[in-house]
Image (cartoon, helix red, strand yellow):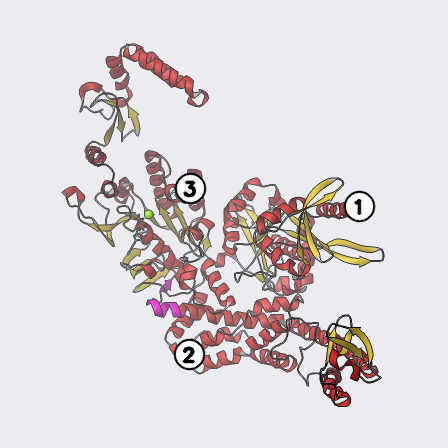
Amino acid sequence: MTEATGIVGEFLALKEETDADVLTMQCGDFYEFFDEDAELVADELDLKVSQKSSHGSSYPMAGVPVDDLTPYVSALVERGYRVAVADQHETADGHAREITRVVTPGTHVETGDDAAQYLATVVRDSEGRGASGNTGSSDGDTYGLAFADVTTGQFQVTQLDDADPGAVLSELYTFSPAEILPGPDLRGDDEFLDRLRERTDATLTLHATEAFAPGRARHRVREQFGAETLDSVGVADDDAAIAAAGAALAYVEETGVGTLAAVTRLQAYGARETVDLDATTQRNLELTETMQGDSSGSLFETIDHTVTAAGGRLLRRWLQRPRRDRGELRRRQSSVAALTRAAMARETIRETLGDAYDLERLAARATSGSADARDLRAVQETLALLPRIADAVAETERLADSPLADALAGADREAAATLAAELDDALVEDPPGTVTQGGLFRRGYDAALDDLIEEHEAALEWLETLPEREKDRTGITHLSVDRNKTDGYYIQVGKSETDQVPDDYEEIKTLKNSKRYTIPELDEKERDVLRLEERRHDMEYERFQDVRERVADRATLLQDVGRALAEIDALGSLATHAVANDWTRPELTEGRELSIEAGRHPVVEQTTEFVPNDLYMDEDRQFLVVTGPNMSGKSTYMRQAALLTLLAQAGSFVPARSATVGVVDGIYTRVGALDELAQGRSTFMVEMQELSNILHSATEESLVILDEVGRGTATFDGISIAWAATEYLHNEVRAKTLFATHYHELTTLADHLDRVENVHVAVAGDPEDGEDDVTFLRTVRDGPTDRSYGIHVADMAGVPEPVVDRSQAVLDRLREEKAIEARGSSGSGTKQAVFDLSSGSFAAAEGAMAGEQQASADGGATAPTDAVTDRFGEDAEAVLAALSELDVNETPPVELMAKVQSWQDDLEE
Ligand code: ADP
Ligand code: MG
């Protein structure tokens, strides 16, 4: 076997061992990718591919230098790949290679992104036994979910008892995980997996089933968090939650990236604490990115004025997981209110926070052993900000009396000060980026280290002053002392003066213009320096590891302080935005009210002269049908209602003169398929699935936004579905609902259903009265629109005059008769069919030649045959029969044309 065969063979064998998508294998100073993996990285990362021959065949090969691997792995992982890394180590007979870690989207620590990075595990326990003691009266299952962010050590678990897959998927979406591990029971549920794939960007990993086994999972959770924790966070009986948690821990450990230690605290939460927001809703409301996928123009980007990464993460989480609990929300509101009125202190705090580093992430780096001295210095500097911020709060009465002071209470100031002082005493102010080359510690930190450093520096000093001494001794002017790898320390003398060197100079090398010498004393000192240097590096590294470990031991403290700073940052951001945009504190109530006076759309108001709108809903005015011409502002008005509710339940102020928001348990939005089709996303099937999801999931405490739902299908199907959905939402679900529609017909629902009311977006000018200009007033008023303006829009868009005129005639006719004839092209003024609005079908027109005749409402069923035979004679029936039997999909085009031709011939006879 040649060496080449060996390497490729070895690579392919290792690849067999792992379920990772890509493998890279260390070969000396390079990490290499072979075969398909080489092609993949070439495509994804623009690496150059060469060929490696082996066994007479040739394999693509791509490589990166050992020190450059990390960014390449990161880039692959960020694209959703799971990357296995095989390292090389020396053995007695050469070297061996083995896979040491698998870097995956959910366990990747070196992320360049400030956003949270969750690994999610989801388990279904079809037995349906949960902590709440499900009696089996319902057909839902029990699900356990765990979310681990290894970059910050956040670890959250929950159990959903008696839940359907939709609820589980919503819960997953709100975390937008980078990677999801479905448990054994879900592995075979293709529908569930498909929905996951469709609706998240997460990498789906089918991980070893054993990790989910209840006993093993429980054991692992206990090991990680301590035996008592399960009880103290109240999940001791939640088997599904524990299985999910255990599997997540196992996976983090098995990937081997050393991040498990950062996961220090188990947090259990109830899904009932947060507002249900499914993926569609998050996207429709453009919470963190726009429909086009840009982050700019999203709600988050618009209101985000945080100055720290952790503050940004927290604010984002508040938007993605709004709360139902008014107590917590009032606490945030009061803090924001206090901050809005304390401009000076607010600015001081924000400025101070501007110097803070990401403590949660630093804690994770310390525990995983990857933190360097600069990281620990960053910890110190950030901890040192805490008293300054605490003082700013304490010295401002408004802030001191607000719950903002409580946010700081979670951080142990004394412990933080102690650790900060300890780090400050230890580390130099501007340490190097490597931890094995010394230069990390201050003098006075450690006596033994001080002695060593002193000795080392004295030896260095001796070397530094050697040239001066030798110049004095020998009278040589061109003399220097230097060091390189091959020669060690040497004395270099210019060629012109080499005859003056004393006897104790021993020549070691001749160069073009100089010679190199050594002397016994220099040899001796060199040995000293090298020995001292090595000892110093070792000792500093050892001491550094101690320090790092002590920081790691206090990971919880760092996380607490980090969280407090993040919270203050996020609250400060909300206050800053509220002040700059004249937002107001909404009143939160238990009731079903949603009343907004002079409300605006939080994003649109940034770029547009926004016309404020009012909205009033309560239990007697539960369902609003929103009508108005195209482009008048229906969608904006409804999104505004949803966004104001969401902002209120994130603890934020809202863009309105005043607002009262009855807290909701879920916000559901659905945009009609046509609008979404334009985005290239949706089909009518998806639209209906999502409508179905809303009708199942929403409760009377929810807010439902339906925007042109039913538009993705034929008019009559659409109206019927919209009509029935309205009745169901009104009668059964009783959710607060806003329904925008261009189906004028739906406005009559208000006459029949108690709590349905009409509102419309007002327009000035009436094109049907011959006024050319229609002005969109953007003002929402009670009552239905009295007409639609589609034809006017068509006119403005430059649709040819005859078509516009004809549309108007058709429309007039429709209004009068509730029926419309379709015009054929053969023969002038002929009508061949009538579209009957009351039956929703076409019927051939009676007396087809008679011009302006129309079908009677009930004539459709019997009239056509007669009319047809009258005109075309008996052959027509045979033609119609043949036509109705023809299978268009099965008939080749040429044959179809021939058939049509022959029918035409028959009819013309
Ligand atoms: P519709 O859903 O009725 O077709 P949209 O809500 O999509 O209309 O709004 C159409 C345009 O009008 C958008 O560009 C939007 O930004 C703007 N708009 C909507 N409401 C307002 C308002 N109250 N003030 C100013 N501009 C608005
Ligand atoms: Mg719209």
Label for residue 687?
3
* Distance CA(mark 1)–CA(mark 2): 72 Å
Which image quadrant: the C terminus? top left
Which is more foreground, mark 2 or mark 3? Answer: 2
Cα distance between the residues tagged 2 and 3: 49 Å
The answer to which of marks 2 and 3 sits earlier in the sequence is 2
Q: Secondary structure at mark 3?
A: helix
Density class for disc 3 (Cα within 10 Å; few <14, some 14-19, many ≥20) is many
Of labels 1 and 2, earlier in sequence is 1
What's the magenta region?
575-590
Q: What residue type is disc 1 on? A: Thr
Examine the rendering and report whether any part of residue 848 can be seen: yes
Task: Say which residue label 2 marks.
Answer: 345
Residue that badge 1 annotates = 2
Q: Is mark 2 within 8 Å of ligand 1?
A: no
Q: Earlier in the sequence, mark 1 or mark 3?
A: 1
